[in-house]
Amino acid sequence: MGRMMAFVLGLALIWAAYPTRALAATWQAVAEASQGQQQQFVDIDSIEPIGRGHVRVGSYYIDRRSGQPQRTDYLTEYDCDRRRFRDVEFNGPVGSDRWLPVDPDPLNSAAMEYVCGIIAQRQSE
């Protein structure tokens, strides 16, 4: 009985810590490299304009080049106008406030173009 109560309490705490929107996820593959060994996905439900040509999105990257798939989760902000990004969170709450150019990374560049295109489409409707 004690384990069940702890489990229910744990779920309640998780639910309280994460808004409903954060729990919803519609993953879209946006790019791949190395013959499909590297893939980038974005969560369409998390795409959020945050002003001045900036957008925030949840995403993850899969790297299968070493045999065992490695997944890295991100919360990224993109500056659509200046083609730059910063990872606010990756695999947890630690991120960066420093902007970096997106162009050297084709997977990240494809993710930026996808989410910035979605925001542009929403704004024109």
Image (tube, rainbow, N blue to C red):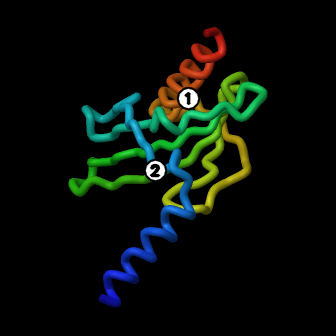
Element type where label 1 sits in the image: helix
In-front residue for pair 57/69: 57
Residue 33, position as x, y percentages in the image: 34, 33
Q: Residue at x 48, y 27 (%)?
A: 110
Amino acid identity at mark 1? Met
Element type where label 2 sits in the image: helix
Residue 75, position as x, y percentages in the image: 56, 47
In-front residue for pair 7/1: 1
Q: Residue at x 47, y 42 (%)?
A: 59
Q: Residue at x 55, y 63 (%)?
A: 16
Residue 15, position as x, y percentages in the image: 49, 62
Residue carrying label 2: 23
Q: Residue furthest right?
A: 52
Quarter of the rendering containing residue 121: top right
Q: Which mark is residue 112?
A: 1
Quarter of the rendering containing residue 115: top right
